[in-house]
Amino acid sequence: MTAQEVADLTGWPRGQVYDLGRQGALPVIRLGRRVFFPRPAVLRLLAAGNGEEAASAGWKTVRKNSLQGFADLLLPKAGLVLLECSLHEKDGSAWVNPPAKELRDASGARAGWKDCVAFQDKAARRAWSDAAVAAVQEWRRTHPEAEEPAEARAVAAVQEWRRTHPEAEEPAEARGGNYEW
């Protein structure tokens, strides 16, 4: 689908469709300078968010204390994507915080975090968080490869390459080369 076709289908501005592609919220196929959006992926993303408060469009595992990682959340009713919402889990409960910016004091030390999105009240925030948790859990269930941190995936890829290319483990001299400069 072209960006205009996606825009016509969703009601979003064409520029926002391109932005979602750049951000990774919508899959993109590039042919030369032309950009296309795979129809099944677009329809799947819309179906996931149809009538829902939130649908997850991406996940990055980062585990530290209660933090489990960061999700990009599509809010279909608003045509909005919130990037890097934090998912936390502790003592059997889970919650999602909207994107936040780090606050620093006069000396430059971390002074806390400030949400970049405001809610009308605590009930609205809780309802959004519950919908976001459900969306992220569904994403993690259907994308198990995303559970592994990027660094671990890179190490596994190198180990697999080494396993399938044992000749690379031999010293240069054993392969008949002398690579002294």
Image (spheres, grey):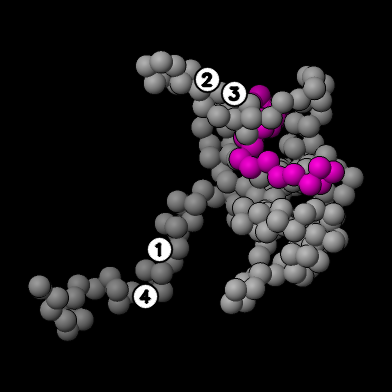
Q: Secondary structure at mark 2?
A: strand
Amino acid type at circle 4 is: His
Quickly name the residue at label 2: 112
Give the quarter of the figure containing the C terminus. bottom left
Quadrant in which residue 90 is drawn: top right
Q: Secondary structure at mark 4?
A: loop
Residue extending farthest to the top is 106
Quickly name the residue at label 4: 165
Residue neighbourhood size for the residue with mark 3, other residues' Cα within 10 Å, grouped as few (<14), some (14–19), many (≥20): few
Q: Which mark is residue 158?
A: 1
Up/down of 72 relative to 112, above or below = below
Res 143 seen here: no
Residue neighbourhood size for the residue with mark 4, other residues' Cα within 10 Å, grouped as few (<14), some (14–19), many (≥20): few
Res 120 seen here: yes
Q: CA distance from mark 4 to mark 3?
A: 49 Å
Q: Secondary structure at mark 3?
A: strand
Amino acid type at circle 1 is: Val
